[in-house]
């Protein structure tokens, strides 16, 4: 019997699920009022107040997705903010990264400012963006943009700097003009670096969206959490966190698929498809 | 009409260290070299003697400190548009398939992608990569990548072909196959070829003329030999003919001292 279920490659998923089940059972046992005598708290309702109750949390999620169907609008807003922040940040990072990498004088001039802006804790900009762009999606996109931009910018800068001189000379010998070099050599090389940072930049766009919502908004999953917190409704806060986590995982999976499609020209370790 | 395809006159290249303006290195000094249309000229010399520098000058990638370059009688300015360059190291664009790489030059010249694709397929077939067009460079073996490079260079039908130790990274069998292939393609089109190598056998087997460079720094030609072996040649078979051995001995006599000098310098530097 043990041989059949012991941890190995085949039963990996089962064991992973088991860990999750154990965590939730533990959580449930510790927080259900009256199940075990209170260890840390004065009365048996306090654990539930601070940590929420898994069953009620799942009920909440069920209401959101199935019974009331009122979370889709919020999810959509959060997704839209993430995607917009990612796209705008990527395009701006690409354009400015390529520009600075190809004109060393401009790079030298802007270098201290870029370093300063990158080391600034940019979450602190969220309140200012809320004043500038209002409580709608624009202020969240702006926050996500500042997070994504620098990741992409530095990767593009690096990507352009590290174009193989031989590949470059070869393209020039094949008759590529300046614009063709940009399009056929610098851009593919830079985008390969962008894609390699795709997970990080999509993740940061998501962080920007949620943090922005949390600091002031009228829609989005961050807003749901903020509201519930104001009413000490820990179950809804926890439900919001779980939904965000699941959402982030889905996003990461989609990015992974996109990446493996776009990067198929890059060699992977252990790939032996030579003929 | 009788202007040489490529004519280097009094070429000197001095590199200045970027960190220390006082440190300079003269790679080649006062090199004069002509390549007639349809002629296959090899340049041999010890390692680090500035052979590649010379080729970069001929390609227009590097401006010499002194001297002039003429291409079919015209002074060269900028990139040498009539030359194709086959590099020593990997020069294929890794984000393009073999076919995409062969097409690249045609695309850069504004050819319709469909016509360019058809011509690329034709050349891939000619270098024996008919079924490998959709592969990326990392999925090809070293020899196949070199063939792709060859197709990429020759699909543009350049009047001058510059080759920088193109086969030095290949094993001896693949190398001989490639050498024969290049000779066949050259015999069919009769382009001017400037071929850089450190391998004297390769130089003699393929060329009409072999130029020997001295050891660096400030290398310059120290000998020139006309290779009068009959064509067509097979690079493997020609190596055992008496005339080949005679030529090899004559050239090696000139080269040996330089090779030892170059080796001693490298040891000193290390």
Image (spheres, rainbow, N blue to C red):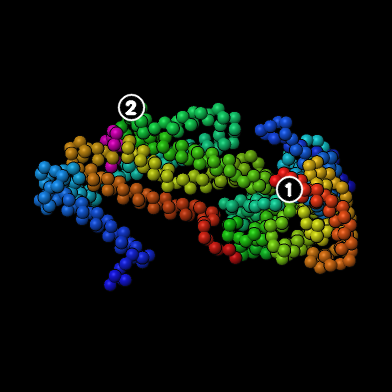
Residue density around tag 1, few if under 14, some if 14–19, many if 20 or more, within 10 Å: few
Q: Quadrant of residue B74?
A: top right
Label count reads 2
Q: Position of residue A246 (x, y in %)?
A: 31, 50
> Residue reaching furthest bottom?
A1
| Camera-nearest residue between A168 and B236 | B236
> Any magenta on residue A219?
yes
Q: Position of residue B108 (x, y in %)?
A: 65, 47
Instruction: Give the residue at x 50% y 41%.
Output: A155
Q: Quadrant of residue B146?
A: bottom right
> Any magenta on residue B150?
no
Give the structural element (helix, strand or loop) at label 1: helix
Instruction: Give the residue at x 87% y 59%.
Output: B249
For discs 1 and 2, the disc positioned in front in the rendered view: 1
Instruction: Give the residue at x 34% y 44%.
Output: A79
Asked whether the viewer can see residue A84, the reply is no
What residue is pinned by disc 2?
A: A131
Magenta segment: A213-221
Give the structural element (helix, strand or loop) at label 2: helix
Say which chain tag 1 marks.
B
Residue density around tag 2, few if under 14, some if 14–19, many if 20 or more, within 10 Å: few
Judged left or right of residue A233, residue B151 is right
Task: Give the spatial CA distance, label 1 vs label 2.
Answer: 68 Å
Judged left or right of residue A254, residue B50 is right
> Residue reaching furthest front?
B268
Q: Position of residue B250 (x, y in %)?
A: 89, 57
Q: Position of residue A171 (x, y in %)?
A: 65, 46
| Camera-nearest residue between B37 and B20 | B20
| Camera-nearest residue between A82 and B188 | A82
Judged left or right of residue A54, residue B263 is right
What residue is pinned by disc 1?
A: B267
Asked whether the viewer can see residue B141, the reply is yes
């Amino acid at each position: 019997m043990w041989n059949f279920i012991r941890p190995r490659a085949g039963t990996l998923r089962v064991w992973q699920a088991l860990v999750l089940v154990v965590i939730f059972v533990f959580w449930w046992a510790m927080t259900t009022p009256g199940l075990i005598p209170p260890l840390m708290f004065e009365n048996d309702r306090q654990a539930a107040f601070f940590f929420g109750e898994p069953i009620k949390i799942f009920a909440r999620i069920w209401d959101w997705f199935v019974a009331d169907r009122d979370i889709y609008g919020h999810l959509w807003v959060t997704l839209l903010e993430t995607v917009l922040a990612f796209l705008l940040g990527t395009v701006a990072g690409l354009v400015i990264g390529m520009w600075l990498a190809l004109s060393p004088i401009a790079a030298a001039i802007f270098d201290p400012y870029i370093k300063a802006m990158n080391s600034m804790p940019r979450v602190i900009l969220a309140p200012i963006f809320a004043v500038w762009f209002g409580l709608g999606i624009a202020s969240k996109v702006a926050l996500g943009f500042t997070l994504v931009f620098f990741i992409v910018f530095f990767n593009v800068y690096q990507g352009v700097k590290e174009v193989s001189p031989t590949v470059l000379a070869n393209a020039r010998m094949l008759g590529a003009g300046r614009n063709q070099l940009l399009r056929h050599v610098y851009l593919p090389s830079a985008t390969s670096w962008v894609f390699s940072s795709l997970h990080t930049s999509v993740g940061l766009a998501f962080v920007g969206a949620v943090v922005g919502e949390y600091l002031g908004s009228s829609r989005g999953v961050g807003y749901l959490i903020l509201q519930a917190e104001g009413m000490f409704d820990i179950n809804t806060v926890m439900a919001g966190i779980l939904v965000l986590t699941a959402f982030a995982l889905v996003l990461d999976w989609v990015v992974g698929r996109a990446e493996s499609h776009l990067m198929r020209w890059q060699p992977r370790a252990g790939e032996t498809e030579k003929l | 009409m009788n202007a040489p395809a490529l004519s280097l006159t009094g070429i000197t290249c001095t590199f200045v260290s970027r960190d220390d303006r006082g440190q300079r290195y003269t790679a080649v000094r006062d090199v004069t070299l002509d390549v007639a249309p349809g002629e296959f000229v090899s340049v041999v010399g010890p390692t680090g003697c500035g052979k590649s520098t010379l080729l970069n000058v001929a390609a227009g990638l590097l401006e010499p400190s002194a001297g002039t370059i003429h291409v079919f009688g015209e002074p060269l300015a900028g990139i040498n548009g009539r030359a194709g360059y086959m590099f020593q190291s990997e020069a294929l664009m890794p984000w393009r398939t073999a076919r995409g790489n062969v097409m690249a030059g045609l695309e850069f010249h504004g050819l319709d992608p469909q016509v360019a694709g058809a011509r690329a397929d034709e050349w891939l077939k000619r270098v024996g990569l008919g079924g490998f067009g959709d592969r990326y460079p990392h999925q090809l073996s070293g020899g196949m990548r070199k063939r792709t490079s060859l197709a990429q260079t020759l699909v543009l039908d350049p009047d001058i072909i510059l080759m920088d130790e193109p086969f030095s990274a290949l094993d001896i069998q693949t190398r001989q196959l490639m050498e024969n292939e290049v000779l066949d393609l050259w015999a069919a089109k009769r382009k001017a070829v400037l071929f850089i190598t450190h391998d004297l056998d390769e130089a003699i087997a393929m060329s009409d003329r072999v130029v020997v460079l001295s050891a660096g720094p400030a290398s310059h030609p120290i000998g020139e030999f006309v290779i009068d072996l009959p064509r067509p040649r097979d690079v493997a078979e020609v190596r055992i003919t008496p005339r080949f051995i005679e030529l090899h001995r004559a050239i090696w006599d000139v080269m040996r001292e330089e090779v030892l000098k170059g080796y001693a310098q490298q040891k000193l530097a290390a």
